[in-house]
Amino acid sequence: MMPEMTPQSASHRAPPSERIDPAELSHLTVEQRMELLTLLDEFPDVFSDIPGMCSLVMHENHVTVNFRPKRFQAYRLPDLL
């Protein structure tokens, strides 16, 4: 189990821009990379390495009376995911 991040312990970690593998951003232009990394460093408390649930917004999907969900056949996912 991973230790819970607190604002105090988060401040001792490297900035988000230093924790990202540059190869993961190779599809972006240099300008886009700089913009993204600046944004991540400017708002590190908004972006987390640990996924979670946001309960700030409720969302509803309104459908028509004759709506029927599509059924898809299950398929196997690669083990690397």
Image (cartoon, helix red, strand yellow):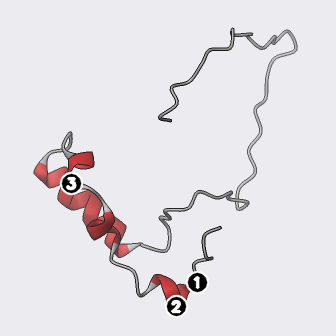
Q: Is residue 65 above or below residue 55?
A: above
Label drawn at residue 6: 1
| Front in this rendered view, residue 42 or 48 | 48
Q: State the CA–CA distance, disc 2 to disc 3.
A: 27 Å
Label drawn at residue 74: none
Q: Which comes before the other along the chain, label 1 or label 3?
A: 1
Question: CB under 8 Å between callouts 2 and 1?
Answer: yes
The three-letter amino acid code for the residue at tag 1 is Thr
Q: Secondary structure at mark 3?
A: helix
Question: CB under 8 Å between callouts 2 and 3?
Answer: no
Across and down, in percent, residue 37 comes to 27, 63
Q: Quadrant of residue 72?
A: top right
Side of 52 relative to 27 (left or right): right
Q: Which residue is mark 2?
A: 8
Label drawn at residue 22: 3
State the residue at coordinates (26%, 56%).
Answer: 21
| Front in this rendered view, residue 48 or 70 | 48
Question: CB under 8 Å between callouts 1 and 3?
Answer: no
The three-letter amino acid code for the residue at tag 3 is Pro
Across and down, in percent, residue 14 comes to 33, 78
Across and down, in percent, residue 12 comes to 41, 87
